[in-house]
């Protein structure tokens, strides 16, 4: 599934894609993927296409939040959580810094 998510984001020209392993750090997912789009429109389009690809793979539409505005879209793909941002919003929250430096707990 991680390969599918990364390929979909690459196809849609996502920028600054970061995959963060969460195994041993979190119980809600194995990976977190953070990526940027150049505009709200691109972020929304990337989220729609990614959701379509995941639905084809697993037979269920993943849950998503934030598609209406396209500033920050969260997509729950089961064992993979995807965050798609506009660059300004990503810089403000710096989400990947919070998770990359977290030590393993298990």
Image (tube, helix red, strand yellow):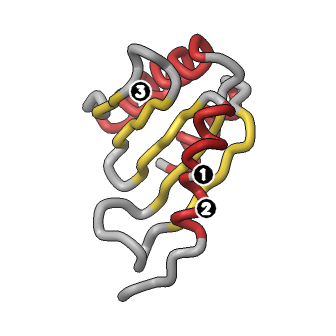
- The answer to which quarter of the image holds residue 15 is top right
Q: Say above or below: 91 vs 102.
A: above
Q: Give residue 79's position: percent from left, percent from top.
A: 36, 55
Query: Which of the numbered marks, if any, corresponds to residue 97?
Result: 2
| Circle 1 or circle 3, nearest the eye | 1
- The answer to which quarter of the image holds residue 61 is top left
Quickly name the residue at label 3: 51
| Circle 3 or circle 2, nearest the eye | 2
Query: Which of the numbered marks, if any, corresponds to residue 94?
Result: 1
Helix or strand or loop: what does disc 3 sit on? helix
Helix or strand or loop: what does disc 1 sit on? loop
Residue at position x 38%, y 25% from top? 66
Q: Say above or below: 70 vs 61.
A: above
Residue at position x 55%, y 46% from top? 93
Helix or strand or loop: what does disc 2 sit on? helix
Residue at position x 32%, y 49% from top? 78
């Amino acid at each position: 599934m991680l390969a599918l998510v990364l390929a979909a984001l690459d196809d849609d020209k996502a920028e600054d894609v970061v995959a963060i392993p969460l195994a041993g750090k979190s119980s809600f997912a194995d990976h977190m993927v953070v990526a940027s789009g150049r505009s709200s429109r691109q972020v929304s389009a990337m989220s729609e296409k990614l959701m379509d690809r995941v639905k084809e793979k697993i037979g269920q539409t993943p849950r998503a939040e934030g598609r209406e505005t396209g500033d920050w879209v969260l997509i729950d793909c089961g064992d993979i959580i995807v965050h798609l941002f506009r660059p300004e919003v990503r810089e403000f929250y710096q989400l990947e810094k919070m998770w990359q430096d977290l030590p393993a707990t298990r």
